[in-house]
C-alpha cells in the first residue's frame, strides 16, 4: 500500500519555491534580498533627488538641451492624470503586496522589476504625506520635463519596472515553481 503522507507528483523544492534562484540567474542570491535592496535604493534615490531638485530649482528652471528641469507640484498620478489620494494609497499598497508575493521564487530580474515598481510607488506616496515647504499638501515633486511631460525619478523607476516585467522571459517548464 502506498504511503499516503507523500504525493509522488510533487516536483517542486521543499520550500515551495520561496527564494529559489533559477539556473539562468546568479546562484546563491536570494530574490527577496534583491527585492528589498531595490525597494530601498529606489526610494532613497527618489527622495534624495527630489530634495536636491527643490533646493537647486527653487530659484528657477534649468534647461539642458531638450531637457528642462523645473519644479511642478503634481497632485495626480503618472503624467499628471487626476486621481484621489485614497485611490493612490490603495494602488500603492496593492503594488507593494504584489511585489512582495511575486518576488518569492522568481528570477532576479523579476524581483528587481518588482523592486523598481514598489520603490517608485512608495516614493511618490511618501511625497503626498511629507508636507514639503512651498508645495501644496498631497502633491508629488516632479522636476524633469521632456516636451510636455514632467516627471520624477520614481516615475522613471515605475516605467522601467513595467517594461522589465512586460519583456521578462517566461520561466521554462524545468524552472516552474510549484
Image (cartoon, rainbow, N blue to C red):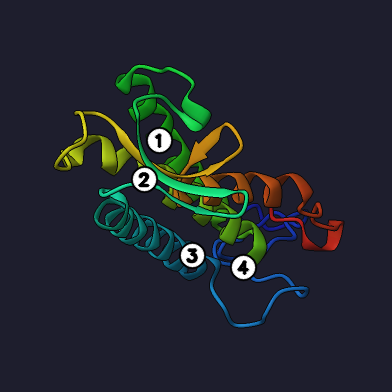
Residue at 62% x, 49% y: name it.
Answer: 66
Residue 16 appears in the picture as rendered: no
Q: Which residue is mark 4?
A: 20
In the structure shown, which secondary structural element does the residue marked by tag 2 occupy? Answer: helix
Frontmost of labels 2 and 3 is 2
Q: Which residue is mark 3?
A: 32
Q: Nearer the viewer, residue 175 or 33?
A: 33
Real-space CA distance between mark 3 and mark 4, rounded to the nearest whole angstrom: 9 Å
Q: Is residue 33 above or below residue 74?
A: below
The Cα–Cα distance between marks 1 and 2, rounded to whole angstroms, is 7 Å
Q: Nearer the viewer, mark 1 or mark 3?
A: 1
Residue pointed to by mark 2: 122
**Do labels 1 and 2 touch, CB within 8 Å?**
yes
Q: Which residue is mark 1?
A: 92
Q: Residues within 10 Å of mark 1 (few under 14, many from 20)?
A: many
Q: Earlier in the sequence, mark 3 or mark 4?
A: 4
Amino acid at each position: 500500500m502506498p504511503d499516503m503522507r507523500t504525493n509522488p507528483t510533487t516536483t517542486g523544492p521543499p520550500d515551495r519555491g520561496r527564494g529559489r534562484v533559477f539556473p539562468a540567474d546568479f546562484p546563491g542570491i536570494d530574490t527577496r534580498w534583491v527585492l528589498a535592496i531595490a525597494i530601498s535604493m529606489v526610494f532613497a534615490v527618489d527622495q534624495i533627488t527630489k530634495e536636491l531638485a527643490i533646493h537647486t530649482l527653487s530659484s528657477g528652471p534649468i534647461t539642458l538641451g531638450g531637457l528642462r528641469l523645473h519644479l511642478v507640484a503634481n497632485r495626480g498620478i503618472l503624467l499628471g492624470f487626476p486621481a484621489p489620494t485614497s485611490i493612490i494609497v490603495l494602488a500603492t499598497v496593492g503594488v507593494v503586496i504584489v511585489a512582495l508575493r511575486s518576488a518569492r521564487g522568481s528570477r532576479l530580474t523579476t524581483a528587481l522589476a518588482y523592486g523598481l515598481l514598489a520603490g517608485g510607488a512608495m516614493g511618490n506616496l511618501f511625497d503626498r504625506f511629507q508636507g514639503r515647504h512651498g508645495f501644496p499638501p498631497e502633491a508629488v515633486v516632479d522636476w524633469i520635463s521632456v516636451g510636455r511631460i514632467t516627471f520624477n525619478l520614481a516615475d522613471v523607476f515605475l516605467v522601467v519596472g513595467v517594461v522589465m516585467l512586460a519583456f521578462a522571459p517566461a520561466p521554462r517548464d524545468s524552472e516552474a515553481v510549484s
